Image (cartoon, rainbow, N blue to C red):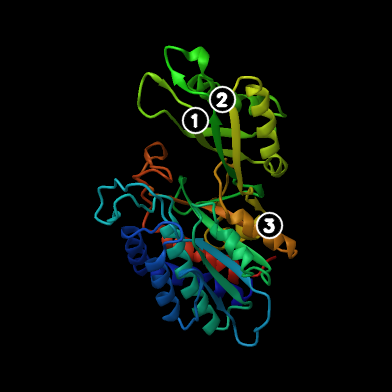
Amino acid sequence: MSDDTHNLYEAITRQATALQPWLWDIRNTLHRRPELAWEEFATTELICASLRSLGLEPRVIRDGVGVVADIIPEGMTGVPPIALRADIDGLPMNDLSPKANRSRVRGKAHACGHDVHTTSLIGAARVLVELMKAGLLRRPVRLLFQPSEERQQPSGASVVVDLGFLDDVTDVYALHCTAHLPIGRFGVREGGVTSACGMLELTANGPGGHTARPFQTANLGREVARVLFQLPDDLLRSYDPRATLSLEFGTATFGNGAANVIPSEAIMRGTVRTPEVERWRNAEADIRTALDRITRGRGVEWEINYTPGVPPTFNTKTGHSASVIERLWDADAVRPTEQSLGGEDFGNMLEAVRKNGGGGNLVRMGVRPLNVPAEEAADIHQSRFDPDPGSVAYGAAYLAGVAAIPTT
């Protein structure tokens, strides 16, 4: 190992560790005031102020939210950059943590860890700027603080792609919190790591009437119940089980509250998930075929409104990520991880960069405190999700590392 390489590893871990108290203060500021998709105005202002303090020139992505900034070593203007991405929005749910740093905004919470992602990238920016000043940063880096990961229409990642912020990017990397791993461990997987996630809305219409004369109606309640149970099962049973298509309904509404009135309209909404790209592309056609098979000739008209949503997140270049983690810490820090049915719009960015001949990946960063057993830790999207304060330093070091450490 050359002296420069050794100095690079040492500088990254030393600086990130030293930044931990400062970064955790930023995380707590974000955590107390979460903002939902396309409303991340205060979050954007905090990011911009933090980057300007480092001598960078941040730009707002769209409609007053989201940030992009470039770190360009001397003599490298015009050289294609590597990109690092963090998502910045919160979730529409309550924070039930007993801690003093919990959300102070009713009905909004950073329960997915996006505040940790944002803070980690701010920390990585500071580390990378210091590496640049020391002559240890050998390529440009683009920082992408993406709005609206939790909302599909429009997805923040797709907007970043459409606005051209990845047109000249070689590779793009991101991380995501997980309570399934302890602090200091990273889940790495080549290939699919999250799944496609689309949104389905079904509207049913048929003659309504009195519950005393259901034979004069379409008996919409029973038809809705049939579809609620049969459509997900049909989609699972009718195709190759290796290409799972999971439909789960989250809401079904019909009727006006009167117990003796059979309604004439019902609306059902749910998510459609699959780990397979081809199944994702064919999902709407498969749903239409299955729904017609179940409902044909039963006197109800069905309208399908399907949004494809996000593609699977397909990882490449995980050998680089694993090598960086091992070099910054040790081999035990790299752990295998499974492909989940959760959706993640970072897949849009990876698809865009692959078209340029590049790649990249999303790793899962362990945030569970060491003194909390795995079975007791709250998962992401739960109201008591509580990452270890050290997670922001690990995140900053990892993101700085994948950008600054040369690929082997």
Number of residues whose C-alpha sits closer than 10 Å to that of mark 2, classed few (under 14), some (14–19) or many (20 or more): some
Disc 2 and disc 3 in contact, CB within 8 angstroms: no
In the foreground, 370 or 248: 248
Q: Is residue 369 left or right of residue 186?
A: left
Q: Which of disc 1 and disc 3 is earlier in sequence? A: 1
Q: Which residue is mark 3?
A: 351
Return the x and y of residue 403 as percentages of the image width and height: 59, 69
Q: Earlier along the polypeptide chain: callout 2 or callout 3?
A: 2
Q: Is residue 49 left or right of residue 176?
A: left
The answer to whether residue 230 is above or below residue 53 is above
Mark 1 neighbour density, 10 Å: few (under 14) some (14–19) many (20 or more) = many
> Looking at the rendering, in which quadrant would you find the N terminus?
bottom right
The residue singled out by tag 1 in the image is 265
Give the residue type at disc 1.
Glu
- Quarter of the figure that contains the C terminus: bottom right
**Looking at the image, which residue is at 53% across and 57% down?**
175
Side (left or right) of 1 relative to 30: right
Frontmost residue, 149 versus 204: 204
Disc 2 marks which residue? 227
SS class, disc 3: helix
Give the Cα distance between marks 3 and 1. 39 Å
In the image, what residue type sits under mark 3? Glu
| Label of residue 40 in the image | none
| Mark before the other along the chain sequence, 2 or 1 | 2
Residue 373 at x, y percent in the picture: 38, 40
Quarter of the view holding residue 28:
bottom left
Q: Amino acid at mark 2?
A: Val
